[in-house]
Amino acid sequence: MLTLIVYPAAFGAPTASPFCVKAMCLMKASGLAWQPEVSSDPRFTPKRKLPVLSDGDKLIPDSDQIRDHLEAHYGIDFDEGLTAQQRAVSRAVIRMVEENLYFILVCNRWLNDENWEVTRRALFGQIPKPLFKFVTSKIRKQAIANVNGQGMGRHSVQERADRAAKDLAAIETLLDGKPFLFGDTPTAADMSVVPMLQAQASSPTTTPISVLVTENATLSDYVARGVSAMYP
Ligand SMILES: N[C@@H](CCC(=O)N[C@@H](CS)C(=O)NCC(=O)O)C(=O)O
């Protein structure tokens, strides 16, 4: 049995991490027998991140590598029916949400002081009280260093919202009235995009970023449709 190691549920999603949700959607779409295993501690995984897929004696880290593994070893094509052109667009969209929108999400959850109070309780509520503040402050410090190193943390909230708005407009244009990005059926890009938008929309407090999804009927409907069709 395949086992997918993911973070616990939070923010109205089956797991706090959009990459873990994506991997869960891939597992569901694969039709293979699998089970989730919940962990809050990625320190002992191959890349010290989650998700990780356990398949026999192999540990496969990273949602992209999990997709590659499922496609290579189980003959699955998550982009079945797509043209070479659509597959290229799919790849670009996945990179846009995972390498840009994701860091905007991290800033929204971890930099914003009000959101952070909710985030730390949602993600680390199981840490014993005497250690809670110390441990969570240390983790936050690292998260802030990461987004500053990546660059997104150096932008103002408004600058981040302006960037997010352009990515979201591109997604809306691509949807163009279709239920999913490339037609009536979800493909790999939807499995990256929907969890990322759902995470932006379920911001602990209303922010300039969260309203870009919650107040946009096309995107909100798309997220609701994707959650119902793709989430386990
Ligand atoms: N490229 C990876 C990203 C995974 C990722 O960034 N996971 C985050 C949670 S959203 C994580 O485990 N972070 C732990 C850390 O950085 O210490 C993927 O697609 O799986």
Image (tube, rainbow, N blue to C red):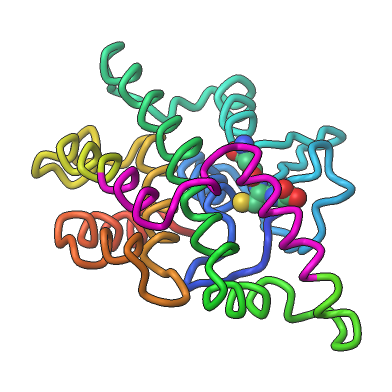
Q: Indicate the quadrant where residue 40 lies.
A: bottom right
Q: Is residue 95 above or below residue 43?
A: above
The percent coordinates of residue 10 (x first, y second) are 57, 71
Residue placed most toward the observer, 123 or 12: 123
Residue stretch in magenta? 136-165
Please tell me whether residue 2 belongs to the stretch shown in magenta: no
Is 27 on the left or on the right of 220, as rendered?
right
Q: Is residue 154 above or below residue 119?
A: above
Query: Which residue is depicted at the point 44% across and 60% down?
Result: 199
Residue placed most toward the observer, 114 or 124: 114
The percent coordinates of residue 55 (x first, y second) are 76, 37
Please tell me whether residue 138 belongs to the stretch shown in magenta: yes
Query: Which residue is depicted at the point 73% across and 81% down?
Result: 125
Query: Which residue is depicted at the point 23% across and 32% down?
Result: 182
The percent coordinates of residue 6 (x first, y second) are 68, 56
Is 107 on the left or on the right of 229, as rendered?
right
* Res. 166 visible in picture: yes
The percent coordinates of residue 181 (x first, y second) are 24, 37
Q: Main secondary structure of the magenta part?
A: helix
Q: How many marks?
A: 0
Residue placed most toward the observer, 189 or 93: 93
Q: Is residue 197 above or below residue 134?
A: above
Query: Which residue is depicted at the point 20% across and 42% down?
Result: 169
What residue occupies the far bottom of the structure in this picture? Answer: 129
Is 33 on the left or on the right of 223, as rendered?
right
What residue occupies the far top of the structure in this picture? Answer: 84
* Res. 4 visible in picture: no
Q: Is residue 8 above or below residue 121?
A: above
The image quadrant in which ligand 1 is located: top right
